[in-house]
Image (tube, rainbow, N blue to C red):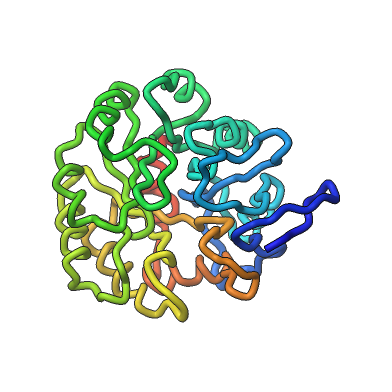
């Protein structure tokens, strides 16, 4: 798939770009709302993609993100290091500064040589393990890295589609754990699946959080997400956060691409009064 770049060149990408304009949601997010999960890609002349990347996304730049977030009413944000950049966090940390460090945090991907205090000074508050896309810290380093970041007050963020297998390791970590994308459960299996039961047991403790950025757990028309999201919000109402997952690298064609206004509408369908999920919970987790 080939798309045009802003400099007039072309590049082959494996996923579609985010929508150029976002439709307004039915209900604008309340003041202080946080997008707890999105990515920035490029400019590629400054921040080239990692050779070991699992996919090749079109550029997704700060002005485009701000246009989308402004339409939804999102004024706080958490930039998440994507697997296409491996452990080179320059694009993510640059985005913190460009977006404004008072209202922006970062979740980074690190190796053993990472300068954690320097990343913390730049706005990093957590470290990510991606067991789905890879190209970062392997799960074998989970416990050791959790002990390294604990003195900084950071958390561990993990994306896995095998929560039943990983949950026993997560419950014993010395830091909070944030589960990406509704814990990676398969919504088609319903709210009583083994994976969902494992996720709910983990959330019944006080050290686990979950992101209700959930379309990756489902397929069109996404109706099976609602019972999953409602169950999570019921069990852990003070430890759910929400994110757009912009620019939506899951989608291969522009026809498939979701609109972020509709994603916020989904949240209001799942939780009619989501202020805690949008404002209060992320303020505590990310230190706003």
Q: Taking 38 as reference, is 99 left or right?
A: right
Q: Taking 165 as reference, is 275 left or right?
A: right
* 256, above or below 128, in the image: below
Q: Nearer the viewer, residue 179 or 111?
A: 111
Residue 144 shows in this picture:
yes
Residue 78 shows in this picture:
no
* 79, above or below 33, in the image: above
Q: Nearer the viewer, residue 113 or 238?
A: 113
Instruction: Give residue 68's quadrant in the image.
Output: bottom right
* 14, above or below 81, in the image: below
Residue at 38% from the left image edge and 40% from the top image edge: 128
What is the number of callouts on the image? 0
Residue at 85% from the left image edge and 50% from the top image edge: 8
The quarter in which the N terminus is drawn is bottom right
Counting from the top left corner in percent of width and height, residue 153 is at 32, 28
Residue at 74% from the left image edge and 59% from the top image edge: 3
Q: Nearer the viewer, residue 163 or 80?
A: 163
Query: Farthest residue in the right direction?
Result: 8
Query: Farthest residue in the front direction?
Result: 51
Q: Taking 47 as reference, is 177 left or right?
A: left
Counting from the top left corner in percent of width and height, residue 135 is at 44, 41
The quarter in which the C terminus is drawn is top left
Residue at 46% from the left image edge and 71% from the top image edge: 266
Counting from the top left corner in percent of width and height, residue 270 is at 37, 71
Counting from the top left corner in percent of width and height, residue 215 is at 44, 67
Q: Taking 129 as reference, is 93 left or right?
A: right
């Amino acid at each position: 798939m080939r798309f045009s770049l802003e400099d007039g060149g072309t590049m082959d990408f494996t996923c579609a770009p985010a929508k150029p304009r976002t439709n307004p949601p039915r209900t604008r997010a309340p003041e202080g709302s946080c997008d707890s999960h999105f990515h920035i890609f490029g400019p590629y002349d400054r921040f080239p993609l990692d050779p070991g990347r699992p996919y090749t996304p079109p550029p997704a730049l700060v002005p485009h993100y701000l246009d989308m977030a402004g339409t939804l009413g999102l004024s706080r944000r958490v930039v998440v290091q994507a697997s296409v950049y491996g452990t080179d966090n320059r694009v993510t940390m640059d985005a913190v500064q460009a977006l404004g460090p008072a209202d922006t945090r970062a979740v980074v991907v690190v190796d053993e040589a990472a300068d954690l205090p320097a990343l913390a000074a730049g706005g990093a508050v957590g470290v990510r393990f991606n067991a789905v896309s890879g190209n970062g810290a392997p799960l074998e380093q989970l416990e050791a890295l959790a002990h390294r970041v604990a003195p900084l007050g950071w958390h561990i963020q993990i994306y896995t589609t095998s929560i039943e297998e990983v949950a026993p390791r997560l419950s014993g970590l010395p830091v909070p754990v944030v589960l990406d994308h509704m814990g990676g459960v398969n919504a088609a299996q319903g709210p009583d699946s083994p994976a969902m039961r494992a996720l709910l047991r983990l959330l019944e403790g006080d050290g686990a959080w979950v992101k209700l950025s959930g379309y990756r757990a489902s397929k069109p028309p996404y109706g099976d997400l609602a019972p999953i999201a409602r169950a999570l919000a019921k069990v852990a109402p003070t430890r759910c956060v929400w994110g757009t997952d912009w620019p939506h690298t899951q989608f291969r064609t522009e026809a498939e691409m979701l609109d972020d206004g509709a994603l916020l509408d989904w949240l209001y369908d799942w939780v009619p009064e989501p202020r805690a999920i949008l404002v209060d919970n992320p303020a505590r987790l990310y230190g706003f």
